[in-house]
Amino acid sequence: MHLLVASLFLTACGNEAGAGDPTTDAGPAVDAATFDAAVVDASSPDDDDAGTPAEDAGQPIDADVPDCRGNAVTCYGRDVPACEIGIGCVVIPRCLGVPARCFEQPTPDDCSAVAGCTWNDGLGRCGGAQRQCATFDEDTCETQPGCFYGGVCGGQITRCALLDEQTCDTQIGCTWDPS
C-alpha cells in the first residue's frame, strides 16, 4: 500500500507580476505551475503508526474468516423445548387451549363448569359466552374444560452473524463456517 503525498505550488508569473518593482522577483516571463509529488511507502509504519489490523494479523485483507452463517428461525411459533434453546427467545407462561363452548354442554353441571356459561332451565340448554383460556391464571386455568397451562415462545431472536463458534450451532437455522 502506498500513500501519495503531493504538494502543488502555483506561481503566478508574468509581465505584470512585480513589473517595475526592483524588490520582487517576477520570475520567468510566462505563467508557470510547479507540481511536486513524493511517494511514501506506508507498509513500514513509523513508531506512531501501528499499521492496519489485517496487516498486523498477518492475513490478507480479503481472507475468509470463520463465522456463523444462516437465517435464525424466529421465536414465534416455536414449541417450548425449541424456545428454551433459542438465543434471545423466552418462554412466556400462560393459559392456552380452546375453551369448551357453552352450547355444547349437555347438562347443568357441565354448563356451570365452563366460566361464562349459564344453564337455561326453560330451554333446557346451556348458553352464554365462554371465557377464553388466556383470561385464566395458573391456578384456575386447568379447572376450565379445554384449557391447559403451558407457554408460548416470544422474544427477539439473535441473528446468526452475531453468534460465536460455541453458540452458533445451537441456534436453529445457523451453521458455523470454519473457513
Image (tube, grey):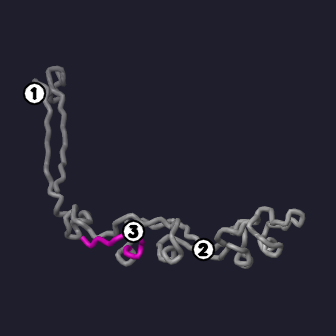
Q: Residues within 10 Å of mark 2 (few under 14, many from 20)?
A: some
Place of residue 107 in the rendered image (x, y in percent of width and height, measured from the top left): 80, 73
SS of the residue at dot 1?
loop
Query: Looking at numbered disc 3 in the image, what kind of residue is underneath it?
Result: Gly
Place of residue 19 in the rendered image (x, y in percent of width and height, measured from the top left): 17, 21
**Residue 103 placement: quadrant:** bottom right
**What is the CA distance from the residue labelled 2 to the residue labelled 3?**
22 Å
Q: Name the N-terminal-most of marks 2 and 3.
A: 2
Q: Which residues are magenta?
A: 168-179
Q: Residues within 10 Å of mark 1 (few under 14, many from 20)?
A: few
Frontmost residue, 161 versus 90: 90
Magenta residue check for 6: no
* Quadrant showing the C terminus: bottom left
* Disc number lying in front (2 or 1): 2
Place of residue 71 in the rendered image (x, y in percent of width and height, measured from the top left): 39, 64
Residue carrying label 1: 28
The furthest residue to the right: 122
Query: Looking at numbered disc 1 in the image, what kind of residue is underneath it?
Result: Pro
